[in-house]
Amino acid sequence: MDEKDPTLIGSHCQYTYCNVLDFLPFRCESCRGTFCLDHRSETGHQCPRAGEWAARRRRAELAATTAQGSGRGRSLAEVEVAKPCARPSCKTVVGKGLVPGVQCAGCNRTYCLSHRLREDHDCKNLVPLGARASSSSSSGVVSADKALAALGRLRAWGSKQKESAASRVLPKAKPSSASARLVATNALKKSAKGDEKLPAEKRVYVYVEAEAETTKSKFPKGEFFYSKDWVIGRVLDAAARSLMVENVNNQGTEEKEKLRVFHVEGGRLLEFSEKVGSTLVNGNTVVLLRGVGPAVPDLIS
């Protein structure tokens, strides 16, 4: 271009059959072409890449905008997932483009703007997904009914446990005085059996007995030591092997055939998941019982 010629300032329109010289030309961000005032729009010059500039801008905005409330620096594009409205009769796809989805706190489903209200998607008759439904009068009544039913089962279970304990002859706790306990513990440490490779600071020395109604065991009682890191379920397995008591807990049988561990000093059945170090101390007595039910019953189901 001859810069001295004032008539050549500007650019010619690149639209076919136009070629007009425009002193202030326009640039199309989609096809990168130069056009005059009349053909500056994508529809005006029939842009072969129509919409590409808008799509690039949308992607840039999504990448630069972090999701509100995520707290993990994820982009909005990663958080928004396109899916249909949860209303069966609605075909609207939410979470895509400029159509946001609204999460209902009652039924935990995502709806479009037309069905976001509870009365619009019959929320009261839907079973909540995942998390529990939000508090309302109906849910409060159901929760109260469940609590009363659970309390009734708890009372029945407690009465049954008392009757079962009264009909069984359980050993008495060891001497309670400090000096008597010390003498008994020293004697127990000399006679107790266990894994000799277990360090002394990890050992817990206990008396183990098999109650008469459990089964006819070859050895009704014994003195053993176990690791503080063991759980009660592992202690039960080891004690059953040592006393030669039949143990069918891992065979999925009925509760009346399963063994449980009763802590004499604590006066309760121990959970299988409890740790020895946090439940038992040296000189305690545990008894293997059969058919006494779980340590804590399932009151809700």
Image: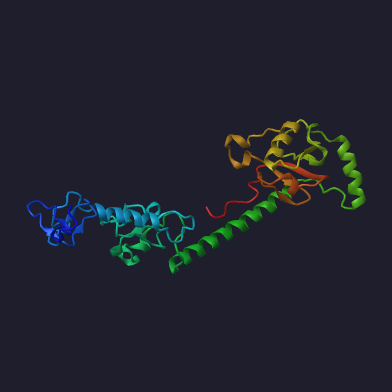
Q: Is residue 228 visible?
A: yes
Q: Residue at x 16, y 62 (%)?
A: 23
Position of 210 with respect to 17 (left or right) is right
In the picture as drawn, the residue positioned furthest to the bottom comes out as: 137
Residue in front for this viewpoint, 235 or 87: 87
Q: Position of residue 232 (x, y in %)?
A: 70, 42
Residue in front for this viewpoint, 168 or 193: 193
Figure coloring: rainbow
In the picture as drawn, the residue positioned furthest to the left comes out as: 17
The correct choice, above or below, for 288 with respect to 265 in the image is: above
Q: Is residue 96 visible?
A: no
Q: Position of residue 258 (x, y in %)?
A: 64, 39
Residue in front for this viewpoint, 59 or 233: 59
- Place residue 206 in its image quadrant: top right
Position of 176 with respect to 229 (left or right) is right
Residue in front for this viewpoint, 86 or 182: 86
The correct choice, above or below, for 229 with respect to 133 in the image is: above
Q: Report how many numbered discs are placed on residues in the image.
A: 0
- Place residue 260 in its image quadrant: top right
The correct choice, above or below, for 260 with respect to 121 in the image is: above
Q: Position of residue 230 (x, y in %)?
A: 71, 40
Q: Residue at x 69, y 53 (%)?
A: 162
Position of 32 with respect to 292 (left or right) is left
Q: Position of residue 288 (x, y in %)?
A: 72, 41
Q: Residue at x 92, y 45 (%)?
A: 183
